[in-house]
Image: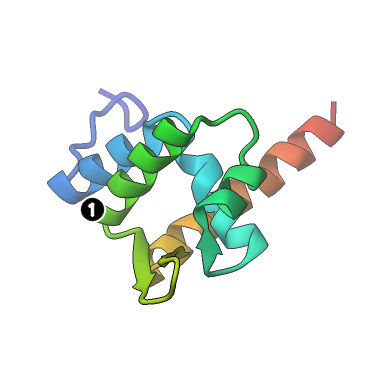
Amino acid sequence: MTASNRKIPLTEAENDLLQTLSARWTMHILLALHTCGNPRRFGEIQGYVPGISNRMLSSRLANLESSGLVSRHVAATRPVTITYRLTDLGQQVAAALNRLRDVAAYSAGSR
């Protein structure tokens, strides 16, 4: 078996992260928070991710929060203000996604 054919087992944490990132819209949300800056309200995030429904955005933000990539802050204002921001881990993941985006742009330009 050559090195390129060998199966490399993933740790549970690696597998969990990849499962989270592979969910539809997740990478878009992370890139939106990374690109447009932190913190952002729900509607602002939705504006950066055209085509995502309220329900899907709410679900993905909850998943990202439980995965430790996004934090949710509730301000005791009237009406209540809820904002979302990338955690330190979320910043690292979003920066890696941004680098992949650069590779895709370079690849598309070299065709």
Q: How many marks?
A: 1
- Residue 2 or residue 45, whichever sits in front: 45
What residue does disc 1 label? 66
- Residue 50 or residue 28, whichever sits in front: 50
Can you give x and y, in whole percent of width and height, for residue 26 in the image? 44, 40
Label 1: few (<14), some (14–19) or many (≥20) C-alpha neighbours in 10 Å: few
Q: Residue at x 66, y 61 (%)?
A: 36
Q: Residue at x 37, y 29 (%)?
A: 4
- Residue 95 or residue 8, whichever sits in front: 95
Can you give x and y, in whole percent of width and height, for residue 73 in the image? 36, 70
Q: Is the residue 12 above or below the residue 4 in the image?
A: below
Can you give x and y, in whole percent of width and height, for residue 67 in the image? 25, 52
Q: Is the residue 5 above or below the residue 48 in the image?
A: above
Pick out the residue farthest to the bottom: 76
The amino acid marked with disc number 1 is Ser
SS class, disc 1: helix
Pick out the residue farthest to the front: 78
Can you give x and y, in whole percent of width and height, for residue 76 in the image? 36, 76
Q: Residue at x 58, y 44 (%)?
A: 46
Q: Residue at x 44, y 56 (%)?
A: 93
Relative side of 28 to 14, left or right = right
